[in-house]
Image (tube, coloured by chain):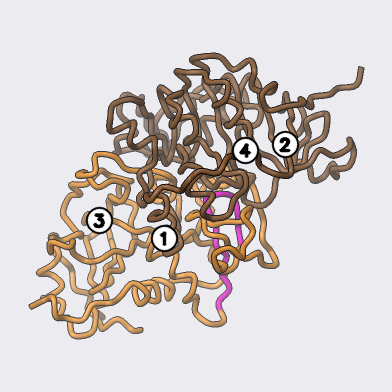
């Protein structure tokens, strides 16, 4: 039954994430859905993207083979230089991350707990994973937005009471954007702020392990 | 006598790297930021039981050749040749490609210490700056905190992380002069500049050797005191032609779709 219901696709989730970007924000986008958000910066707003490998301010991903191999994003894709770009070494790059100089970071996730704990670096079944810069970014950014499908392929909730996957960082997530809902992590618990078209708060709750506080202003996701 | 850190060949530059040495390998993970020729020379020399310190453990030359790189060797060449006993890395395995390191790890033939990327950079910096251990908040509540001292300052928990030094740092730079001043190109600076000076001996592979004074003093990124040896990368790679593996072809297709991890 739920299989037939409307769900946001990857591009649309990225579009919703990008609506959080405010003028002047310094933003780091993780690999996957997050990086797609760079295509949807709201018109008239100027933001600056940071990448772990030592750059602030870069343009779009180039066509394969057309970019400068010495200018890549954190996913290794070549990107375009823009006026204002700056380069620095890895230590400086993570001084920016860990020193609280990023306004927003957007990461993918396997699970988020009701306290805002994040698990996104390792699938237990794979027996190994890669920490990379995820732990630094999760803890360092002023505001952490997580984007993921609301449930696993098997239909299990990804928004959980306690993460069962290995933790990336504790109490770090501020906003969860899924394919059916937008949820804010607050001191009082998880607040359901938006639902996907055709979804009711009760239906979202059925796919969410912890209890959701339905915001009085809860509405359909504006796309 | 004039200072001259320029070494004539890559083989000469790595000649004193012995079995059991700890080696920092610069770069982010992309081969353009990697000291390819130094790694090739080290593989030719054939030492064993190395401990590597690097961001990734390499993807292998097949992957990079498909993307059109002439200089295509990364850290993978050391694992392929069975030269490494332990890797200290932030991103040792990839989400889209099983590299040689992961195969060795699953076979129990290599050890690993996984370190958050910023902690890796900071531990290297601590060694370079002559610091002792550093309190770092990243990793609290995760696997990273196992076995480490945890302490609170102003209500926030931190882990005590020790400096990371090495016998040799192999790095890739863009320009270098005979004193050892270095510049880098764009995002290929990354761990190269961070590692310069953090090991007992820092060896830089450069695209261009320039005359002393040619690099604008305002633009020197790594000052000469951090660098011991410089070797010039040739214009053309020597490499032999061999067929590209099916796995590399599949990885290439996935990389083009979404980038790597």
Name the residue furthest left: A1
| Quadrant into which the N terminus of chain A falls | bottom left
Q: Nearer the viewer, mark 2 or mark 3?
A: 2
Please state the chain letter of the residue tagged with numbered disc 3 in the rendered image. A
Q: Residue at x 53, y 36 (%)?
A: B121
Question: For mark 1, what is the residue?
Answer: B253
What label sits on residue A112 in the rendered view? 3
Please state the chain letter of the residue tagged with numbered disc 1 in the rendered image. B
Is A54 in the magenta?
yes
C-alpha separation, residue under disc 3 versus residue under disc 4: 35 Å
Q: Residues within 10 Å of mark 2 (few under 14, many from 20)?
A: many
Question: For mark 2, what is the residue?
Answer: B222
Q: Nearer the N terminus, badge 4 or badge 2?
A: 4
Q: Residue at x 34, y 73 (%)?
A: A13
Relative to B77, is A92 above or below?
below
Q: Residue at x 53, y 39 (%)?
A: B74
Q: Quadrant of residue A161?
A: bottom left
Q: Are marks 2 and 3 in contact (CB under 8 Å)?
A: no
| Quadrant into which the C terminus of chain A falls | bottom left
Q: Is residue B44 left or right of residue A182?
A: right
Element under label 4?
Answer: helix
Give the chain ID for the orange colour. Answer: A
Asked whether B69 or B240 is in front, the reply is B240
Give the chain ID for the brown colour. Answer: B
What label sits on residue B192 in the rendered view? 4
Q: Nearer the N terminus, badge 1 or badge 4?
A: 4
Q: Which residues are magenta?
A: A45-57
Can residue B38 be seen in this snapshot?
A: yes
């Amino acid at each position: 039954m739920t299989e037939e219901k409307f769900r946001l696709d990857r591009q649309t989730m990225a579009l919703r994430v990008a609506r959080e970007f405010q003028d002047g924000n310094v933003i780091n986008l993780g690999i996957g859905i997050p990086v797609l958000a760079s295509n949807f910066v709201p018109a008239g707003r100027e933001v600056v993207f940071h990448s772990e490998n030592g750059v602030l301010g870069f343009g779009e991903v180039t066509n394969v083979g057309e970019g400068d191999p010495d200018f890549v994003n954190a996913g290794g894709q070549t990107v375009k230089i823009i006026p204002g770009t700056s380069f620095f070494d890895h230590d400086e790059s993570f001084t920016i991350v860990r020193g609280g100089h990023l306004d927003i970071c957007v990461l993918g996730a396997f699970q988020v707990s009701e306290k805002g704990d994040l698990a996104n670096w390792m699938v237990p079944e794979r027996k190994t994973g890669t920490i990379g810069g995820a732990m630094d970014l999760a803890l360092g950014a002023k505001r952490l937005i997580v984007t993921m499908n609301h449930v696993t392929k098997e239909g299990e909730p990804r928004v959980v009471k306690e993460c069962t996957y290995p933790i990336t960082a504790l109490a770090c997530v501020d906003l969860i954007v899924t394919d059916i809902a937008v949820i804010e992590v607050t001191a009082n618990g998880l607040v359901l702020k938006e639902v996907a078209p055709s979804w009711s708060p009760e239906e979202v709750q059925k796919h969410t392990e912890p209890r959701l506080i339905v915001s009085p202003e809860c509405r359909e996701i504006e796309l | 006598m004039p200072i001259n850190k320029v070494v004539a060949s890559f083989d000469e530059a790595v000649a004193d790297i012995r079995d059991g040495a700890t080696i920092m390998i610069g770069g982010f993970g992309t081969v353009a930021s990697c000291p390819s020729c130094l790694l090739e020379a080290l593989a030719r020399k054939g030492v064993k039981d190395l401990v590597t310190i690097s961001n990734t453990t390499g993807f292998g030359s097949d992957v990079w050749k498909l993307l059109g790189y002439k200089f295509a060797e990364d850290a993978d060449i050391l694992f392929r040749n069975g030269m490494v006993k332990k890797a200290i890395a932030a991103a040792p395995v990839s989400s889209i490609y099983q590299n040689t390191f992961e195969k060795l790890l699953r076979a129990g033939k290599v050890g690993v210490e996984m370190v958050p990327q910023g902690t890796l950079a900071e531990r290297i910096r601590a060694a370079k700056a002559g610091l002792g251990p550093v309190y770092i908040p990243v990793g609290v509540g995760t696997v990273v905190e196992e076995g480490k001292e945890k302490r609170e300052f102003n209500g926030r928990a931190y882990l005590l992380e020790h400096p990371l030094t090495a016998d040799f740092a192999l790095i890739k730079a863009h320009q270098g002069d005979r004193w050892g001043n270095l510049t880098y190109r764009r995002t290929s600076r990354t761990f190269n500049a961070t590692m310069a000076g953090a090991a007992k001996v820092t060896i830089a592979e450069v695209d261009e050797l320039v005359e002393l004074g040619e690099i604008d003093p305002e633009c020197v990124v790594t000052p000469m005191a951090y660098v011991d040896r410089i070797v010039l990368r040739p214009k053309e790679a020597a490499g032999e032609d061999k067929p590209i593996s099916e796995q590399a072809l599949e990885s290439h297709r996935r990389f083009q779709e979404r980038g790597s991890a």
